[in-house]
Amino acid sequence: MAVNPPGIYAPLSCENNADLTSTLANEGVLDFKVSISTDLNMIFIGDSIASQLSQAFDSAALEPHYDYLSNSIKGTFSYMNKKKHICITQSTIRGGGGTAYMRNNGILSSNSMIRFHHCEHGSQAWGTDLVASFLDNNHPVDELPRRKGVDEQPRRKGGGRSFNAAILKIPALGWIKDIRSVTKEKITTLTFSNNVKTLNDWVGIQRVNEMIRQIARNWEFSPTNDLSSVRWVLVQEFGNFTNQMIWTNAKHIGYDVDLNFSVNGWEGVSADFLLERFKQVSKFQYPHSKPMVCAKMPNSTNVQSCVYNKISPDGMHWCTPTLGPRYSASVACLLGCVYNGELGYLSERENSNIMNESVRACEDECNQRFMSLVPVDNDWIDDGVTIYSRPRF
């Protein structure tokens, strides 16, 4: 099967940044590509980071003769600097499924949109009617001017009246009760970024991530034919994955950090190095963390830049060609935990506890294999190899 190259988040390219450290460049860690085929409908919800991650997934799931820029329907909005920001997308993907993305943060809250902004979706507020329009593939963005040689590509057909999964990135957690017609939700754990200004902030991030895990563990599964109910909540340990990358890079450029990632709570131990930052030049921008963005240790403490790595271009977003394949494989793996197999999660088994334990074991293995720096098995990377996850019924 032909495989597309990992998607590049157009506003923030890492193409010319320094190569990865020797550890991160080891075979099977970050040097593979992923091709995904599914007939599921998925919606990604969150901020600009969710936008770039959904784009990475689309790049892995589009037919090889398409690319993200030509086969996705997009809407944009302008904010402050008048630059265009993506707020909605729709894509047709390999296997007959489809993806959608909705931007959700303070900038595009209902109040802000009514007063200041307007995403190209035909209304000045988000709502469940927009979700339905994604499913019907009658989103007003379809009426945007067609581009010669681009918009002739086939568009998503829509696969029923429900999304099979919602992939939520905080600050989208509060949308769990606002989005109907979703049968599975996957919540992505929070990561370090330049918004973390103090160690107390970092402790707070760990607490939120533990809350996410508790929500998933305490979610009561019950077999039902009601497609408007959320039957599974799974956790994607994206924070664990990105933290391992930052710690490994920090060790490489000279910070004294422990790379024993098997110790419970390792992210909170001696984490003050994360706060070594560039000199702040604007009160509107938080300076980048050096161990997160630098490929080499700067020569002095009072600097505003460094030789950038291929992990993060700005201390907030991620280099999707580097992280995109593992992220996309993780999403596919977690979806497989509840949808793959002859019956999948629709099986009306008498003992739902056994089913829950089986899916949780699959969830844990997906995170261990893809949301970490553990090398992927060599025999998985051979041309033509097809793999899928499934619960252990």
Image (cartoon, grey):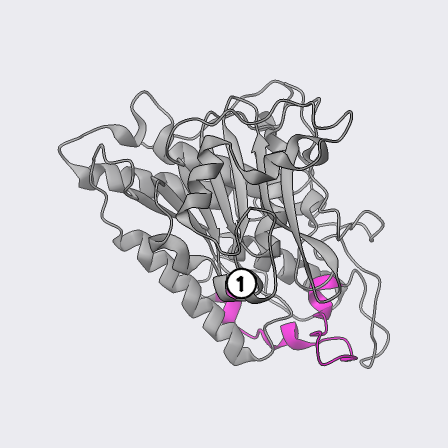
Part of the protein shown in magenta: 266-293
Q: Quick one: 387 or 256, which is closer to the camera?
A: 387
Q: Position of residue 110 (x, y in %)?
A: 49, 61
Q: Residue at x 33, y 54 (%)?
A: 177
Which element is circle 1 on?
helix
Answer whether residue 235 is visible to the viewer in this image.
no
Q: Position of residue 371 (x, y in %)?
A: 52, 47
Q: Residues within 10 Å of mark 1 (few under 14, many from 20)?
A: few
Q: Position of residue 28 (x, y in %)?
A: 64, 37
When the figure is inspected, residue 116 is found, relative to residue 352, above or below; the finding is: below
Q: Is residue 196 magenta?
A: no
Q: Say left or right for 128 vs 35.
A: left
When the figure is inspected, residue 116 is found, relative to residue 348, above or below; the finding is: below
When the figure is inspected, residue 102 is found, relative to residue 199, above or below; the finding is: above
Q: Quick one: 69 or 250, which is closer to the camera?
A: 69
Q: Say left or right for 38 vs 226.
A: right
- The amino acid type of the residue labelled 1 equals Ile
Q: Say left or right for 267 vs 48.
A: left
Q: Is residue 268 magenta?
A: yes
Q: Residue at x 63, y 56 (%)?
A: 245
Q: Position of residue 140 (x, y in %)?
A: 56, 39
Q: Say left or right for 307 vs 171.
A: right
Answer whether residue 52 is visible to the viewer in this image.
yes
When the figure is inspected, residue 120 is found, relative to residue 212, above or below; the finding is: above
Q: Which quadrant would residue 292 be assigned to in this image?
A: bottom right
Q: Residue at x 53, y 25 (%)?
A: 37
Q: Quick one: 70 or 250, which is closer to the camera?
A: 70
Residue that numbered label 1 is attached to? 114
Q: State the predominant SS element of the stretch in magenta.
A: loop
In this rendering, the count of numbered labels is 1
Q: Which quadrant would residue 71 be assigned to in this image?
A: top right
Looking at the rendered image, the quarter that the C terminus falls into is: top left
